[in-house]
Image (cartoon, rainbow, N blue to C red):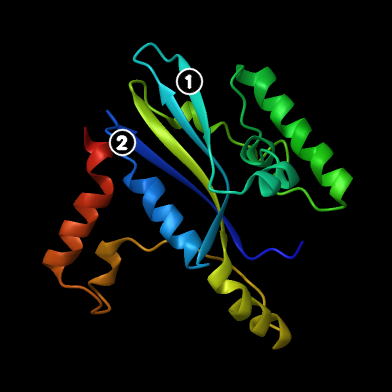
């Protein structure tokens, strides 16, 4: 199966109040063939640090069978502390060996995102395939190009180059980081 550029996004939610709006937007993006959600998890962490997880995806049943659960294997995500993280990393290594691929994270580079989730909050881990970028990626490769780095740019950094006003950047920044300040 050919696959487009893949990105893992980890989003935090203080006292989440979900109404299906995020799933609806992901479905819209899938319908337009902009993205595909390869895997996603919603993680709830109680005030005491207890965890609950719900697997979410907009994959078809056949795609889900083909791809399986990838986030845990990709980053060594475990619900059982160090043992769970090792099990997740081992599952990822097995998947890589079976598919003849290259591991994304070594044991030293793996990170336990569960530790980064504050108590009494939630996180969404979304593994996205960017369908829109496939033709661009392929054109870059044909021209001998390659990815050196990538990342999201803060709205505050866009003021200097004139893409947004200071007021717009402040509003966007506050919207994007409001939950972290609570």
Q: Is residue 148 above or below residue 179?
A: below
In this figure, what is the number of numbered marks?
A: 2
At numbered mark 2, what does the secondary structure look like: helix, strand or loop? loop
Q: Residue furthest left?
A: 167
What percent of the width, then of the height, locates residue 103?
Answer: 76, 48
Could you say which quadrant of the image residue 139 lies in? bottom right
x%, y% of residue 5?
Answer: 62, 64
User: Element at badge 1?
Assistant: strand
The circle drawn on residue 128 is: none
CB under 8 Å between discs 1 and 2: no
- x, y percentage for residue 38? 60, 50
Q: Residue at x 44, y 38 (%)?
A: 124
Q: Residue at x 65, y 20 (%)?
A: 82
Q: Which residue is mark 2?
A: 18
The part of the image, by quadrant, that contains residue 182 is: top left
Check disc 1: other Cα within 10 Å, few if <14, some if 14-19, many if 20+: few
Residue at the image point whose x is 44% and y is 53% from the top: 26
The residue sitting at 72% across, 36% down in the picture is 107
The one of 113 and 34 positioned closer to us in this rendering: 34
Q: Which residue is mark 1?
A: 52
Q: Residue furthest bottom?
A: 143
Nearer to us in this view, 34 or 143: 34
């Amino acid at each position: 199966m050919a696959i487009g550029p893949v990105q893992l996004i980890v989003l935090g939610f203080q006292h989440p109040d979900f109404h299906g709006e995020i799933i609806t937007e992901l479905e819209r993006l899938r319908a337009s063939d902009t993205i595909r959600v390869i895997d996603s998890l919603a993680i709830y962490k109680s005030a005491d640090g207890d965890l609950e997880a719900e697997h979410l995806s907009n994959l078809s049943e056949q795609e889900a069978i083909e791809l399986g659960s990838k986030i845990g294997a990709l980053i060594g995500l475990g619900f059982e502390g160090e043992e769970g993280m090792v099990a997740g990393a081992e599952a990822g290594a097995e998947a890589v060996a079976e598919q003849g691929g290259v591991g994304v994270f070594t044991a030293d580079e793996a990170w336990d995102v569960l530790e980064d989730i504050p108590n009494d909050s939630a996180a969404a881990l979304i593994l996205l395939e960017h369908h829109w970028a496939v033709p661009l990626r392929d054109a870059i490769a044909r021209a001998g190009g390659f990815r050196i780095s990538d990342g999201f740019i803060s709205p505050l950094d866009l003021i200097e180059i004139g893409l947004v006003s200071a007021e717009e950047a402040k509003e966007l920044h506050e919207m994007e980081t409001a939950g972290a300040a609570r």
